[in-house]
Image (spheres, rainbow, N blue to C red):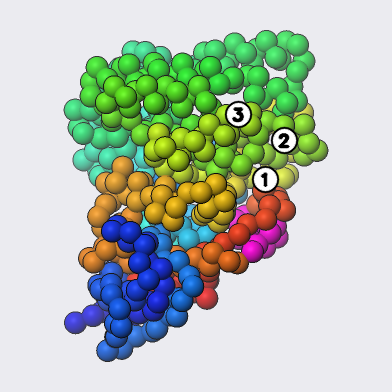
Amino acid sequence: MNTQPGLLIRDGMIIAPAGPTVADLAIEDGRFARLGKGLELDEGKVIEAAGLVVAPGAIDPHVHLDLLTFSGQTSSDDFAGGTAAALWGGVTTIGDFAYPAPGQRLVEALRQRRKLAKKGALTDFFLHVAILESPPDLEEQIVECWEEGARTFKVHMNDNRCGPEFLDRVCRRVARLGGLLLVHAEQGREIENNRQKLLAEGRLSVQSLPRSVPPELEAGAIRQVLAIAENHGTRIYVVHLSSRLGLEEIRKAKSRKIDVAAEVCIQHLLLNEEAYNLPGAHYIACFPPLRTDADREALWEGLADGSIDTVATDHCPFLCSQKDLGKDDFTKLAMGIAGVETMVPILWSEGRRRGLSYERLAELSSTASARIFGFYPAKGAIQPGAVADLFIYNPERRFKIDWKKLHMNCDFSPYQGLEIVGFPELTIKGGKVWEGSK
């Protein structure tokens, strides 16, 4: 007996594992039940989807909601508001982070973060545990998190405390557990040296941000951590890959069968470092910084040929007033931009223009993340028995991005005025039409 009303989506182009097919899709008790022609429901709602695309609910595995950052500023979207914005954009699952306070046990940070997320999140969520310190019992603390249900961990190589010995300890322990290690791949000690030089020269504007973290530091960090990971058999997930040089290291590692996946964020696909010369450039400051057009084009090539596995946002929004506090000194800027609501519209619009198929776009925005983070086949694909998370996409709808019409708690958009072709018009999570998208 079904515990919730059924749904029938009629005549949509269903992006299914076997390929796109125009068919009816029946949802029963919150799960995909049947796919075929001429389906009927005994009771429930019928959604007419002729001319529309039905895709698996998007997964953004990299967001920072309600996060106190090193700048002293807290990201402006909380779990309730940020996940509502996600649903508006077709995202039904997000991956956030548990960052411990100095000296705090990792498992306590995980429990606190999970409690906060459960209280507010409207989407499904999962948490990555950030490892920032190297106490004597670090290995024991990682195991405690594992026993608490954590399966993914993160290190920040841009933090100069993250040296080879620390990386070796983390890689070894995570590998023995069978977990996945997320890596912010930038060489922290070199970043600090570059910053000190720029500060001494009085070059504090946001235009100096890319000079403080050149692409060579991303490539070097990737090379370093993958060499350590290869010794231990650690599964690695490189977050926010931003450069051609970094991509080359990913390709080399994959050719050697190292277990590594790479993520790219929307900002590095759409924007370039010339934006730092525009008025209000400090509003779009983020880590890694924006790169050149050549880097941007290389990342699109990586998406097309499979070298890059997933697309995410690193959604970490701030209000203009928060950003303004660091406008005259890039080392004090609140780093991060909003993106969870616009990820699918931008990726699918630009991806289609560049010739990516609907199947590849669904893979990048949903299926690959579901596989990498252990949710597939329950999530990430429209197939019988899977959780009925999806969005219905109108490929003809035109939309000009305007922060005033978006739902993220941010009073600017790095993509202001961008023309989008195609938009998620309806989001269904767990078999229920999300009321906000009606």
Q: Is residue 250 above or below residue 346?
A: above
- Seen from the viewer's position, the closer of residues 237 and 18 is 18
| Residue appearing at x 65%, y 62% in the figure | 399
Please, what is the three-letter code of the amino acid marked with disc 2? Answer: Ala
Residue identifier under label 3: 294
- Indicate which disc, 1 or 3, sits on the residue closer to the N terminus: 3
- Give x and y (percent) for residue 416: 71, 51
The circle drawn on residue 33 is none
- Give x and y (percent) for residue 320: 72, 45
Quadrant of res 122: bottom left
Q: Is residue 40 above or below residue 245?
A: below
- Give x and y (percent) for residue 24: 34, 76
- Indicate which disc, 2 or 1, sits on the residue closer to the N terminus: 2
Q: Is residue 126 visible?
A: no
Q: CA distance from mark 1 to mark 3?
A: 20 Å
Quadrant of res 75: top right
- Indicate which disc, 2 or 3, sits on the residue closer to the N terminus: 2
Confirm or deny contact between disc 2 and disc 1 (CB under 8 A).
yes
Residue identifier under label 1: 414
Give the magenta range: 398-409
Q: Residue furthest right?
A: 279
Confirm or deny contact between disc 1 and disc 3 (CB under 8 A).
no
Q: Is residue 318 visible?
A: yes
Q: Is residue 213 magenta?
A: no
Please, what is the three-letter code of the amino acid marked with disc 1? Answer: Pro
Query: Which type of secondary structure does the marked residue at label 3 adopt?
Result: helix
Please, what is the three-letter code of the amino acid marked with disc 3? Answer: Ala
- Give x and y (percent) for residue 358: 44, 56
Query: Which type of secondary structure does the marked residue at label 2 adopt?
Result: helix
